[in-house]
Image (cartoon, helix red, strand yellow):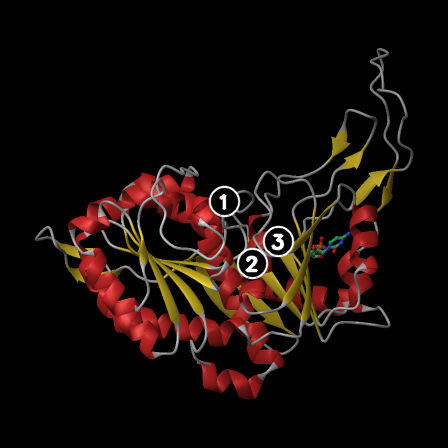
Amino acid sequence: MSLRDKNILLIVTGSIAAQKSPALARLLVKEGANVRCIATKAAQEFVSLEELEQASGNPVSHDLWKPGQTEEGAAIEHIDLTRKSDLVLITAASANFMARMVHGYAEDLAEATLLANNSKPVFIAPAMNVEMWNHPATRANVQTLVERGAHFIGPAEGDLACGETGLGRMSEPEDITVALLAHMRLHAILNGYKALVTSGPTYEPLDPVRFLGNRSSGKQGHAIARALSNAGADVTLVTGPVSIPDPAGVKTLHVETAQEMLTAVQANAPYDIAVCAAAVSDWRAKETSAQKIKKSGDAPTLELTENPDILAAISNADNRPALVIGFAAETTSLVDNAKAKIDKKGCDMILANDVSGEKVFGHDETHIHLITRTDAEDWGVLSKTAVAKKLATRIIRTLQPDVCKDVA
Ligand code: C5P
């Protein structure tokens, strides 16, 4: 895998590490990429337009109001630059620039260009002081950008421009290039595989106003859909009602009830990989009232009926995916219970959440044990994004043991 003929849009923002950008542009060109640069005003405090132009071999764009040369015409340069690129790389990404990205600012050419991009992968190589990197505002912004699909390269640990030492140094141009190459390779590894992920809760109506539901946030399932999509799979995400955004580049189907979830899952079959992360409501009301149930003095008695088990239905279908993975929340005998669940549902693996005394629903971290028919691994406490990446790697290793040796 190389960068040959890849159109890279290199956006240079204003940290002192912007000085490394010409060297980076040169390396990318050496790898066969066609590099177009945008320099922000702040970037030009540290690197000249001429240096970037010489390094990339292309004119450098820098002014939203005095656009440079594009094929379609000057007025739409910010649209043109993103349409023509295969990927966007932001270097020396300052805390300020990332904050502006999060809020969708479009005050300069770099910001407007990023706002006009909903489909091309975005890589961010940050550079800032360690305290700025660790500040809760930056942590939250990084998290948001990751949730929207951005890939972070670095920052690295070391001496910082301000004289302090710590995490915040921009990764070296060689490391950024290697990371991009590794991404290209990984991104293609599940090409041709179709994956299904279920996520979020289900809401089972009692009447037009009330429902039976649960506190699932969808964070874990959405992160898994994103990780599989990043690995090149064609992912369908079927999600119950959640308040987080659809993952970029993933076909997302919104449903409310368990029955709707099963219908959507079956309508899009077959798949090669299925991961059931949804917290499906076990029961629904036997009868749903067409009118709002009125208070009548006596509390109503609800008669419930069991919902279809989507994981079991997928596992036992004629067109069963090669790999079917479920989740389990356990408080006791985690491994034994998860193994019993594998047999009961007919799936291949269970990610068991240890929920004894811990809060998992809605939280960013979770303690996972990966259970197979023969094995149990304690993954410790990880962020849900880290769990998703680890699971995607595990799926790749299971489906393609030979290729994976190479990638690792
Ligand atoms: O039986 P239990 O609810 O513990 O099983 C959890 C696993 O089964 C999860 O992977 C969940 O997504 C899946 N499940 C399902 N349909 C149901 C209930 C659970 O797909 N009705």
Measure how far apart labels 3 and 1 are at the Cα level.
14 Å
Under mark 1, the amino acid is His
Which sits in the foreground, 356 or 394? 394
10 Å crowding of disc 3: few (<14), some (14-19), many (20+) = some
Residue 170 place in picture, x, y as percent:
24, 60
Under mark 2, the amino acid is Arg
* Some atom of ligand 1 lies within 8 Å of the CB belonging to the residue at label 3: yes
Q: Earlier in the sequence, mark 3 or mark 2?
A: 2
The quarter of the picture where the C terminus appears is: bottom left
Instruction: Determine whether label 3 and label 2 are within 8 Å by CB.
Output: no
* Some atom of ligand 1 lies within 8 Å of the CB belonging to the residue at label 2: no
Residue 55 place in picture, x, y as percent:
25, 68
10 Å crowding of disc 1: few (<14), some (14-19), many (20+) = some
Residue at left offset 55%, top offset 48%? 219
Residue 152 place in picture, x, y as percent:
38, 59
Which label belongs to residue 171?
none
Instruction: Classify residue 56 as left or right of residue 18.
Output: right
Instruction: Determine whether label 3 and label 1 are within 8 Å by CB.
Output: no
- Residue marked by disc 1: 363
Q: Which of marks 1 and 2 is in front?
A: 2
Quadrant assignment, res 319: bottom right
Which label belongs to residue 226?
2
Residue at left offset 89%, top offset 26%? 289
Residue at left offset 55%, top offset 79%? 397
Measure how far apart labels 1 and 2 are at the Cα level.
18 Å
| Residue 383 visible in the shown view | no
| Residue 9 visible in the shown view | yes
- Residue marked by disc 3: 329
